[in-house]
């Protein structure tokens, strides 16, 4: 039987791949296929866990501000087409304990950079005083040296819904989607690519490899060390009786020490009973397929002791729920969109480093442009 032929095949339908597929599906007369080894949105990659922070003045890089702004426009377009809300604007707070220079996502002075980029890029922000923070958000116990940046357009996204909506709209526009189909190999033939799946072969003019942490499986040996897989844990902590208002909190991030791990972030309560919070880990683990998905009692205890106690009021030492996810991290936390072996018709992407979701909608558009559409 002749192998089906597509103009463009997108491998991996998480945050990035679903955005690429949706953007491709808006182009007329193009045969496109999206493939995923699981049933996205699923719980085994980097795009699950209820919420993702979005903010505009991103300290990771001033050039990313336009991606975040454009993504907000695209989420709006998707919400209108899909009929469900993906982005919630809550405002966002960036706290810095101000005691040590704090580095995050590969850059020094994350707080100062955020402020500078907000000024340069016309992002609406305010600097809070300590008293204002205490009155408005008494959960935060920050030291007198603390610095408080507040951004108006920040908020959270529903990642699973964003993926679901983009895949739905892509299919509606004519895209083919194959799930529970793992791509085993990608061979370059003279004028096309041959993809081998379990029991199937597909041919394509162009390939987008947006396989998240699994992208390493397809990279040459010398490129693989550019990407580190780092296990992350999300915690939902019970709200203390009598502590009101967690539902009205902004999204927040707090660098409290000099190391990248001296960091916590969280969300307003979505259910009135729990608050989702997390830190970051940059310890390398081997492969997404071998990730320890169990959160031990000891880990919960350490999280409470090192990341919550003495820093956050209004939460109990009771983990109601937890979830394991992973970052795929580059050294400087920049995103990679690279032609495989220099071939512009085969792009591989790594756009995580713990901050990619908010940019994913616009990255989809950007990748489609790079393919020459
Ligand atoms: C705990 C955590 C918190 C985060 N918080 C934020 C945040 O607050 N704000 C923010 O902006 N970003 C955040 N991020 C980063 C953001 O979530 C990621 O950048 C984004 O989800 C990465 O998406 P992806 O499409 O690259 O990867 P994934 O979502 O993992 O998608 C990759 C897909 O490829 C598929 N795949 C892999 N190999 C194959 C194969 N061989 N064949 C077929 N399919 C394959 C997988 O099944 C998967 O569906 C966070 C990440 C984590 C883990």
Image (cartoon, rainbow, N blue to C red):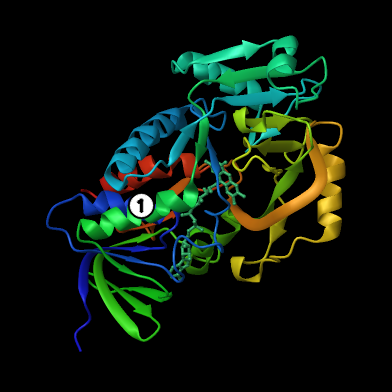
Q: Residue furthest left?
A: 29
Q: Could you tell whether 84 is left or right of 233 in the image?
A: left
Residue at point 62% right, 56% down? 326
Q: Could you tell whether 119 is left or right of 209 in the image?
A: right
Q: Secondary structure at mark 1?
A: helix
Nearest the viewer among 264 and 102 is 264
Nearest the viewer among 160 and 192 is 160
Q: Is residue 241 above or below residue 19?
A: above
Q: Is residue 32 above or below residue 251?
A: below
Q: Position of residue 363 (x, y in %)?
A: 38, 43
Is residue 318 visible in the rendered structure shown here? yes
Q: Quadrant of residue 116?
A: top right
Q: Residue furthest front?
A: 242
List the residue tagged with mark 1: 165
Q: Position of residue 257 (x, y in %)?
A: 79, 31
Is residue 343 visible in the rendered structure shown here? no
Q: Is residue 284 above or below residue 192?
A: above
- Crowding at dot 1, Cα within 10 Å, few <14 / some 14-19 / many 20+, comes out as many
Q: Quadrant of residue 275?
A: top right
Q: Quadrant of residue 186?
A: bottom left
Residue at point 23% right, 72% down? 190
Nearest the viewer among 233 and 372 is 233
Q: Could you tell whether 94 is left or right of 355 in the image?
A: right
Residue at point 51% right, 20% down? 152
- Asked if the beta carbon under badge 1 is closer than 8 A to the nearest atom of ligand 1, the reply is no
Please count the marks in the image: 1
Q: Where, quadrant-wise, is the N terminus in this rendering?
A: bottom left
Residue at point 50% right, 66% down? 220
Q: Position of residue 96 (x, y in %)?
A: 72, 24
Q: Is residue 182 above or below residue 71?
A: below
Q: Position of residue 361 (x, y in %)?
A: 38, 43
Nearest the viewer among 177 and 157 is 157
């Amino acid at each position: 039987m002749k192998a089906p032929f597509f103009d463009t095949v997108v491998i991996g339908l998480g945050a990035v791949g679903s955005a690429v597929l949706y953007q491709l599906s808006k182009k007329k007369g193009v045969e496109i296929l999206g493939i995923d080894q699981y049933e996205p949105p699923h719980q085994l990659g980097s795009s699950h866990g209820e919420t993702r922070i979005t903010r505009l003045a991103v300290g990771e890089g001033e050039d990313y501000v336009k991606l975040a702004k454009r993504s907000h426009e695209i989420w709006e377009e998707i919400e209108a087409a899909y009929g469900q809300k993906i982005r919630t604007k809550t405002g966002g707070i960036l706290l810095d304990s101000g005691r040590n220079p704090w580095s995050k996502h590969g850059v020094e002075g994350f707080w100062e950079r955020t402020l500078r980029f907000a000024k340069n890029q016309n992002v609406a922000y305010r600097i809070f005083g300590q008293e204002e923070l205490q009155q408005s958000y008494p959960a935060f116990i920050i030291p007198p040296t603390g610095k408080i940046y507040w951004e108006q357009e920040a908020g959270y996204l529903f990642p699973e819904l964003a993926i679901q909506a983009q895949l739905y709209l892509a299919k509606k526009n004519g895209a083919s989607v194959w799930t529970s189909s793992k791509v085993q190999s990608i061979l370059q033939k003279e004028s096309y690519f041959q993809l081998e799946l379990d029991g199937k072969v597909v041919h394509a003019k162009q390939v987008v490899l947006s396989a998240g942490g699994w992208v390493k499986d397809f990279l040459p040996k010398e490129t693989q060390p550019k990407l580190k897989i780092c296990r992350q844990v999300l915690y939902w902590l019970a709200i203390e009786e009598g502590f009101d208002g967690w539902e009205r909190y902004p999204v927040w991030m707090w660098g409290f020490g000099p190391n990248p791990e001296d960091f916590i972030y969280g969300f307003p309560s979505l259910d009135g009973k729990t608050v989702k919070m997390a830190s970051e880990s940059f310890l390398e683990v081997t492969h997404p397929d071998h990730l320890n998905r169990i959160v031990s009692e000891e880990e919960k205890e350490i999280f409470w002791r090192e990341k919550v106690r003495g820093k956050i009021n209004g939460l109990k030492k009771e983990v109601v729920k937890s979830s394991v996810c992973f970052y795929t991290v580059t050294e400087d936390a920049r995103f990679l969109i690279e032609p495989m072996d220099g071939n512009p018709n085969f792009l591989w992407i790594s756009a995580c480093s713990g901050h990619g979701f908010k940019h994913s909608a616009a990255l989809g558009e950007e990748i489609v442009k790079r393919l020459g559409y």
